[in-house]
Image: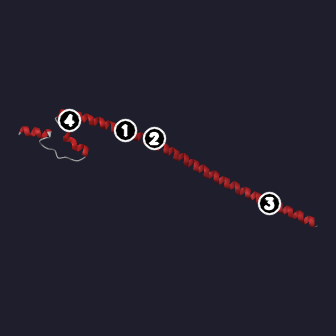
């Protein structure tokens, strides 16, 4: 009699362990599925950020190249302007205010138009 009770108890224990293992396995599979979903979301976001970074880097490089080109063109135009000033009868000092960014009141004696007007009078 005692043997049959112990056999049935061991069967119940085995069934309980099997149910516990099945439950743990189901929970583990659920966690793995959640982790895989999160991983896929992170990988998609990473890919998006890498694309955005590549675009921003390209734009920055193009902007730097354009800024360099504009700077070189401005230097070239400034040299041409300075070379043409004597031909126009103007002196570099007359345009010193351009470098400082200030507005200077034109001196009628130095202004070519002012000189012309004085000669006419």
Q: Which disc, if any, is residue 17?
A: 3
Q: Are marks 1 and 2 in contact (CB under 8 Å)?
A: no
Crowdedness of circle 2 by 10 Å Cα count: few (<14), some, many (20+)? few
If the image is split into quadrants, where does the C terminus sit? top left
Q: Relative to 57, is 85 on the left or the right?
A: left
Residue denoted by label 2: 58
Which element type, helix, strand or loop, lies under badge 1?
Answer: helix
Does residue 33 sit above or below 2 in this rendering? above
| Image height of 93 relative to 18, above or below | above
Q: Residues within 10 Å of mark 1 (few under 14, many from 20)?
A: few
As rendered, which of 37 and 90 lies closer to the eye? Answer: 90
Residue plotted at (27% across, 37% down) = 78
> Which is nearer the N-term, disc 1 or disc 3?
3
Q: Secondary structure at mark 4?
A: loop
Q: Element type at marker 3?
A: helix
Estimate the spatial distance between the alpha carbons at disc 2 and disc 4, rounded to whole Å.
40 Å
Q: Is residue 5 left or right of residue 44?
A: right
Q: Give the residue furthest to the left.
A: 121
> What is the C-alpha distance between the residues marked 4 and 3?
100 Å
Determine the residue positioned at 74% across, 59% down.
23
The mark nearer the N terminus, 2 or 4, is 2
Tell me which residue sits at (19%, 46%) in the image.
Answer: 104
Q: CA distance from mark 2 to mark 3?
A: 60 Å
Report the residue marked by disc 1.
Answer: 68
Residue located beneath label 4 in the image: 85
Q: In this orientation, which residue lies closer to the viewer: 10 or 115?
A: 115
N-terminal-most mark, 1 or 2? 2
Marks 4 and 1 sit apart, C-alpha to C-alpha, by 26 Å
* Image position, residue 5 (x, y; %): 90, 66
Badge nearest the viewer, 2 or 4: 4
Left or right: residue 57 compared with residue 66:
right
* Display coloring: secondary structure
């Amino acid at each position: 009699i005692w043997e049959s009770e112990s056999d049935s108890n061991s069967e119940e224990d085995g069934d309980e362990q099997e149910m516990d293992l099945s439950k743990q396995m189901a929970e583990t599979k659920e966690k793995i599925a959640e982790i895989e979903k999160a991983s896929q979301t992170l990988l998609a976001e990473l890919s998006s950020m890498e694309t955005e970074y590549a675009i921003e880097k390209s734009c920055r490089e193009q902007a730097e190249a354009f800024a360099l080109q504009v700077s070189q063109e401005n230097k070239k135009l400034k040299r041409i302007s300075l070379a043409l000033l004597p031909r126009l009868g103007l002196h570099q000092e007359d345009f010193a205010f351009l470098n400082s960014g200030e507005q200077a009141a034109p001196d009628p004696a130095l202004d070519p138009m002012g000189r012309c007007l004085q000669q006419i009078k």
